[in-house]
């Protein structure tokens, strides 16, 4: 994998940081895209870089129109991008749809769905003529909310993630002829800071207690599925939406 690059959005903490750790450990350079916390991004990059894999943080609002092109151009300075992990996600404050803030809804759709679509489009434009050079892979991080609808919490986020699932299914069929695999990981409730940002710091533990396994997932358990989908072991897996939910449906 020497010289190959994985682009990971939302890579400074939580699931994203766990993905960064695993991909760097597997020998890929990682272009860590983050939006706000420079300290977290720098700490993740420093902690998970290895003797053979660089981890380079890059601050960027992925929802602005020129972000995908800029991300791929800058990542290409590090090596050859062959993996895109669309992990960045926000929910907004927990609420019914009736009581939801308009900005929260728009930002969630922009980050979770629109930015994912545009980054996938840039990957296709960047990779479409490279079929015989090396395998390339997109992994989108969805959510169990796409199935449950997340009523009373953030149905707009659930709708955006359902869109990510549809994007994954359709794009996988378009991309296969170019030697590009497109898959998704759909996590169940995971112990990350997303719950505190939504206004319920204890949500992961509370929901996890009601799951078949009696606990929430750890970020690394989700990252393990992401890593596998980017690997040669998953070379015939395309268009899959892999549930990592502990049995929750």
Image: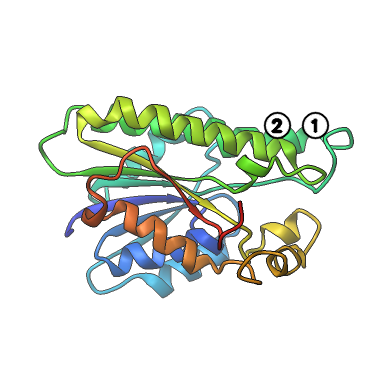
Q: Is residue 183 left or right of residue 151?
A: left
Relative to 222, is 90 above or below?
above
Q: Residue at x 32, y 27 (%)?
A: 173
Relative to 200, is 155 above or below?
above
Q: Residues within 10 Å of mark 2 (few under 14, many from 20)?
A: some
Asked if residue 12 shows in the view, the reply is no
Whole-percent x, y for residue 19 in the image: 42, 61
Towards the viewer: 152 or 110: 152
Asked if residue 39 shows in the view, the reply is yes
**Mark 1 residue element:** helix
Whole-percent x, y for residue 53 in the image: 27, 66
Query: Where, by quadrant of the figure, is residue 172 drawn?
Result: top left
Q: Residue at x 73, y 63 (%)?
A: 207
Q: Specify the color scheme.
A: rainbow
Towards the viewer: 163 or 26: 163
Q: Is residue 239 left or right of residue 166?
A: left
Judging by the rendered image, the residue that carries numbered circle 2 is: 106
Query: Where, by quadrant of the figure, is residue 180 drawn?
Result: top left
Q: Residue at x 37, y 37 (%)?
A: 239
Residue sitting farthest toward the left: 132
Judging by the rendered image, the residue that carries numbered circle 1 is: 102
User: Do callouts 2 and 1 mark residues in contact (Cβ within 8 Å)?
Assistant: yes
**Mark 2 residue element:** helix
Q: Residue at x 50, y 49 (%)?
A: 87
Whole-percent x, y for residue 40 in the image: 56, 66
Towards the viewer: 30 or 238: 238
Residue sitting farthest toward the right: 99
Whole-percent x, y for residue 233 in the image: 23, 56
Quarter placement of the N terminus? bottom left
- The mark found on residue 216 in the picture is none
């Amino acid at each position: 994998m020497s010289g190959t690059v994985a682009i990971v959005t939302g890579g400074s903490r939580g699931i994203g940081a766990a993905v960064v750790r695993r991909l760097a450990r597997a020998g890929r350079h990682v272009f860590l895209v983050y939006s706000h916390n420079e300290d977290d991004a720098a700490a993740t990059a420093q902690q998970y870089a290895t003797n053979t894999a660089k981890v380079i943080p890059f601050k960027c609002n992925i929802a602005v129109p020129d972000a995908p092109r800029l991300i791929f151009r800058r990542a290409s300075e590090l090596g050859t991008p062959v993996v895109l992990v669309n992990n960045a996600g926000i929910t907004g404050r927990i609420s019914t749809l009736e009581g939801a803030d308009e900005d929260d809804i728009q930002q969630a759709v922009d980050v979770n769905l629109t930015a994912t679509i545009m980054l996938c489009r840039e990957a296709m434009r960047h990779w479409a003529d490279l079929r015989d050079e090396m395998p390339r892979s997109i992994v989108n991080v969805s959510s169990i909310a796409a199935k449950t609808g997340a009523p009373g919490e953030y149905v707009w986020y659930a709708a955006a993630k359902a869109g990510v699932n549809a994007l994954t299914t359709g794009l996988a069929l378009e991309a296969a002829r170019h030697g590009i695999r497109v898959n998704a990981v759909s996590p169940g409730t995971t112990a990350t800071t997303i719950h505190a940002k939504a206004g319920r710091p204890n949500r992961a533990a509370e929901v996890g207690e009601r799951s078949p396994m009696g606990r929430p997932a750890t970020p690394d358990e989700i990252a393990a599925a992401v890593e596998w989908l980017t690997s040669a072991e998953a070379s015939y897996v395309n268009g899959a939406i892999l549930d990592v939910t502990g049995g929750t449906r």
